[in-house]
Amino acid sequence: MPLREHYLLNHPQNPTFLRSCPLRKTNMSNLVVCFKEQPAEQHLIDRIHRAWPDVEIINVGQKNVASALMEADYFCGHAKVPVDWEAVVNQKRLRWIQSSAAGMDWCLVPPVVQSSIRLTSASGALADQVAEHTLALILAWMRSLPTFIREHQDSQRIHPSSHQRAHRFDRGAYRFWWSRTAAG
């Protein structure tokens, strides 16, 4: 890991660090990354750096995101703390906000909306997966799948149309009967 990134990653709790870092390249665009309370995991930062090697990545947690946004060229994440968006816009530096969530209420304030900052979100990124999961749950419910799973776990057999217990289900005897019947 380059010394500059090591230095930035190991001092995320110092809010003045971003401005006073002697290794920071001022002529290079920077990307502020903030997903959780703590700074993002290193493997995520590495993936971003491989995809966008010409940008300096500033990895902060929620505690320091407001101060980091004052000097950001790009922002990826979700700010869950109060941010002075008017001051951020007045810096005339921030060019793009990529929300890591579908909702963007946290940054859709008049100063940001009226500015030239590009706003994008993860809305629709998982739409197919959510639709498939919803359909699977509806079909499972319609076919009483939860009842059958519960009964299977209890090793009891139920009649599919009445959903009532017919008798205790002996798995060993059933397997023996099925193997004899299938063999014919």
Image (cartoon, rainbow, N blue to C red):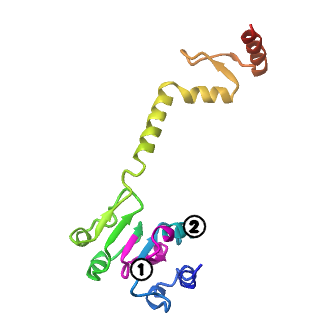
Mark 1 is surrounded, within 10 Å at the Cα level, by few (under 14), some (14 to 19) or many (20 or more) other residues, namely many
Would residue 80 be seen by someone viewing this image from the given angle? Answer: no
Q: Residue visible at 24% across and 67% down?
A: 113
- Asked if 163 appears above or below 30 in the picture, the reply is above
Q: Is residue 155 left or right of residue 77?
A: right
Q: Using the rendered view, name the quadrant where residue 147 is placed.
A: top right
Identify the element where label 2 is drawn.
helix
- Asked if 124 appears above or below 109 in the picture, the reply is above
Q: Residue visible at 50% across and 71% down?
A: 49
Residue for badge 2: 43
Residue 64 is a magenta residue: yes
Q: Amino acid at mark 2?
A: His
Residue 139 picture location, percent across and down: 47, 29
- Asked if 184 appears above or below 2 in the picture, the reply is above
On residue 176, which mark appears? none
Residue 98 picture location, percent across and down: 37, 65
Residue 39 picture location, percent across and down: 52, 72
Residue for badge 1: 68
Q: Using the rendered view, name the quadrant where residue 66 is placed.
A: bottom left
Q: Residue furthest top?
A: 184
Q: Using the rendered view, name the quadrant where residue 184 is placed.
A: top right
Q: Which residues are magenta?
A: 49-75
Q: Residue visible at 47% across and 76% down?
A: 57
Q: Is residue 85 left or right of residue 56?
A: left
> How far is disc 2 from disc 1 in space, using C-alphas?
21 Å
Identify the element where label 1 is drawn.
helix
